[in-house]
Image (tube, rainbow, N blue to C red):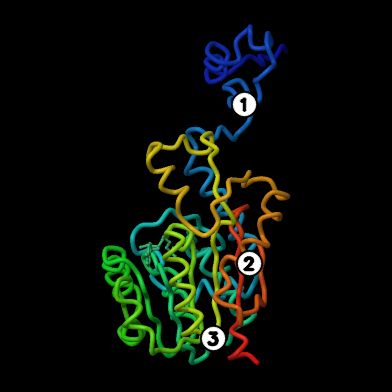
């Protein structure tokens, strides 16, 4: 009996509009246009959530036992309706995946038991939430802009229990000098935030860290990028110009070129060192981003 292997309605449509009878006329760009986007799975233009979830799924499935344990300690991660995937019965989002990867890196060098921690630029508080859920620390000081701190204060009060929340102190950035100068912290954390401050403010914060902390964990980009094809620059040229002026590292590089990124690492390590008496104890690429680097510095006076 003859079989009928003809195109489905779906493929009739694809052939009508995209892989037409003229599809093979010019191959110059076909792998990056609709012809290949109808053949391959990965059309990047309309699939942001697909990509995010694919990234989260793969990162989660690659987590080691220790990081799964850290993640499971963090309760109420779904407050705020994050975009999640479900792996082995656990819902996971990119923010907390990064948080456990960051914490794992920190733990290799710093003993957090009973530690006093300061974080500059805490966002909504994912790092604070993760550290307080995993360690019996003495206190956690958040230094941030007022509006962001309203968000972190509310969020952390919802996700943490009263005893944990009581350990947090909130300090407005404009008061940081007077509020913190006489304090001492075992660890200062800065994640994806000094790169968005003016170089002068970064220098002032590094000076403060140099005087008040025993160690410093930093995770930031190694430089800037201008590739419009990545996001279409949705906030316009003014936002790009502002972004180009912030952070201690403002050289433009191809952020998806390992050699270009590796070549920028020496400057990264130098730029975030809080002082002459500080040593970089560990550094590495901050997964999953190709161009984010992380480092831990130790204050020689303290770790002698
Ligand atoms: C991109 S968010 C990153 C937040 C968080 N570290 C994370 O990775 O989820 C940048 C953070 O830096 C804070 N920030 C910006 N300028 C600051 C300043 N001058 N002093 C303190 N924090 C600042 C913002 O309010 C925000 O909390």
Kindly indicate whether the residue at mark 2 contacts the one at mark 1 (C-beta within 8 angstroms).
no
* Residue that appears at 52% across and 60% down: 248
Residue at (48% x, 76% y) in the render: 207
Mark 3 within 8 Å of ligand 1, using the beta carbon: no
Question: Which residue was labeled with disc 3?
Answer: 214
Decide: few, some or many residues near mark 1? Use Cα within 10 Å; few <14, some 14-19, many ≥20: few
Which residue is pictured at 46% across the width and 66% down the height?
A: 202
Q: Residues within 10 Å of mark 3 (few under 14, many from 20)?
A: many
* Mark 1 or 3, closer to the camera: 3
Q: Residue at x 36, y 65 (%)?
A: 124
**Relative to 64, residue 86 above or below:** above
Q: Are marks 1 and 3 in contact (CB under 8 Å)?
A: no
Percent x, y for residue 93? 48, 59
Quarter of the N terminus within the rendering:
top right
Horizontally, residue 80 falls left or right of residue 127, namely left
Secondary structure type for disc 2:
helix
Mark 2 or mark 1, which is nearer the start of the sequence?
Answer: 1
Mark seen at residue 296: none
Quarter holding the C terminus is bottom right
Q: CA distance from mark 1 to mark 2?
A: 37 Å
Mark 3–mark 2 Cα distance, whole angstroms, equals 17 Å
Residue 269's label in the rendered image is 2
Question: How far apart are the alpha carbons under marks 1 and 3?
Answer: 50 Å
Q: Who comes first in sequence, dot 1 or dot 3?
A: 1
Ligand 1's image quarter is bottom left
For label 2, count other residues whose C-alpha is less than 10 Å away and answer few (under 14), some (14-19) or many (20+).
many
Q: Position of residue 152 (x, y in %)?
A: 32, 69
Q: Nearer the viewer, residue 30 or 143?
A: 143
Residue closest to the eye, 89 or 279: 279
Closest to the observer, 45 or 90: 45
Residue 98, percent across and down?
Answer: 53, 64
Question: Circle 1 is placed at which residue position?
Answer: 32
């Amino acid at each position: 009996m003859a079989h009928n292997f003809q195109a489905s309605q779906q493929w009739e449509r694809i052939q009508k509009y995209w892989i037409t009878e003229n599809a093979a006329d010019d191959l110059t760009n076909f792998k990056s246009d609709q012809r290949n986007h109808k053949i391959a799975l990965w059309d990047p233009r309309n699939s942001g959530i697909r990509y995010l979830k694919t990234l989260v799924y793969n990162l989660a499935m690659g987590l080691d036992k220790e990081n799964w344990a850290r993640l499971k300690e963090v309760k109420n991660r779904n407050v705020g309706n994050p975009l999640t995937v479900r792996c082995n019965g656990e819902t996971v989002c990119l923010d907390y995946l990064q948080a456990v990867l960051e914490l794992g890196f920190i733990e290799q060098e710093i003993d957090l038991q009973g530690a006093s921690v300061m974080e500059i630029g805490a966002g909504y508080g994912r790092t604070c939430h993760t550290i307080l859920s995993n360690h019996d620390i003495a206190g956690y000081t958040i230094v941030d802009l007022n509006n962001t701190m309203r968000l972190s204060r509310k969020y952390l009060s919802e996700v943490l229990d009263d005893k944990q929340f009581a350990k947090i102190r909130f300090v407005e950035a404009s008061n940081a000098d007077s509020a913190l100068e006489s304090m001492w912290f075992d660890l200062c954390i800065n994640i994806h935030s000094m790169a968005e401050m003016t170089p002068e403010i970064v220098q002032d914060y590094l000076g403060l860290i140099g005087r008040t902390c025993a160690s410093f964990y930093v995770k930031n980009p190694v430089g800037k990028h201008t590739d419009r094809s990545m996001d279409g620059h949705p906030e316009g040229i003014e936002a790009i110009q502002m972004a180009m002026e912030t952070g201690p590292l403002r050289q433009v590089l191809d952020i998806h070129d390992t050699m270009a990124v590796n070549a920028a690492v020496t400057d990264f390590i130098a730029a975030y060192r809080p002082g002459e008496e500080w040593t970089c104890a560990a550094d590495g690429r901050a997964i999953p981003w190709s161009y984010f680097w992380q480092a831990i510095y130790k204050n020689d006076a303290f770790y002698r």
